[in-house]
Image (spheres, rainbow, N blue to C red):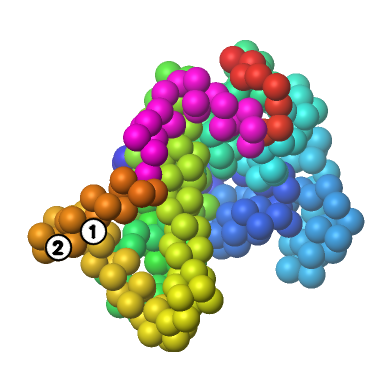
Amino acid sequence: MATEIQTDATTVAVIGAAGKMGQRVSNNLVGSDFRVLFSEASPQGQQLIRDLGRELTESADAAARADVVILAVPDVVLGKVSEELVPLMKPGTVVLTLDPAAAYAGLLFEREGIHYACAHPCHPSVFLERTTKEEWQDTFGGIAAPQEVVAAYEGGDAAKQELADSVIRVMYAPVVDVHWVTVKQLAVLEPTLVETIACMVGALLTEALHETVHTVGVPEKAARAMLLGHTQVALANTLKGSNPFSDACLIAMDYGRESIVRDDWKKVFEDEELDKVITRMLKIKEIKR
């Protein structure tokens, strides 16, 4: 998305600047043209910010001064933090969260005149054409390897969406593109598509490797080499259609689906199942929206 936002006139506050994601987004923002305010509640985190040579700002002051407030805090406390800080913000402020669960569940403190957006990094693609050592080492993104971002904003103000877009492209840089969806669509992507399914499959592969080595007795180096190479082929063949599987492989795949995958697994895409997993993640009794 093209933008004409003047970043040198924009103040961005990072609430929770010493956390895992707080540090990641701060590292990119600190080298930008934005004026950046760093806020951290824990004494240990405050010392970390000082050790990085960054000035600390009280959360209330940062929220009141910023044009964009990034809430880089755990989902389970987003409701409480937003309740404390949103009333202090000036009209027109953009509140930017990093995960969609709290927004989807209706936990964010709502106030008229405040714009709510959420942006989650896709992380560098498994098919990314990496050309440098730094890109190969950056598996998470936000350092050297380009990644895409999916964001949600339903406020209807094009200027505020452009403002959010300009901040997102810096805090997750290098960014290939930002894809805008609804809050619910972002929640289907994260957690359903990538955590409930993709991350679970990754953990299953690790368990399968352990069984191959420790139960069957295959040498670990041989098993790991076979698994890692075939995982790339499997993803390329299924997601990109690079090569057809052999007839024998298709038979083994059918056996695997029959033996491992439940027939009703696609129910995880139903609304009630999305609500179920998000209430479990946020440790709440029900969705409040």
What residue appears at the point 44 percent right and 86 percent down from the top-left corner?
Answer: 219
Q: Quadrant of residue 240?
A: bottom left
What's drawn in magenta, residue-wise?
261-281
- Image side of residue 22 versus residue 276, left or right: right
**Amino acid at dot 1:** Ala
Q: Is residue 57 above or below residue 263?
A: below
Residue 254 in view, yes or no: yes
Is residue 280 within the magenta segment?
yes
Name the main secondary structure of what is drawn in magenta: helix
Viewer-proximal residue among 217 and 210: 217
- Residue 134 can be seen, yes or no: no
The tag on residue 252 is 1
Label 2 sits on a secondary structure element that is: helix
Amino acid type at circle 2 is Ala
| Coordinates of residue 115 in the picture (x, y in percent) | 56, 24
User: Which residue, given by chain and number where applicable, does mark 2 sit on?
Assistant: 248
x, y percentage for residue 75?
A: 66, 38
Q: Residue furthest right?
A: 43
Q: Position of residue 164 (x, y in %)?
A: 49, 37
* Secondary-structure class at tag 1: helix
**Residue appearing at x 35%, y 39% in the figure:** 179
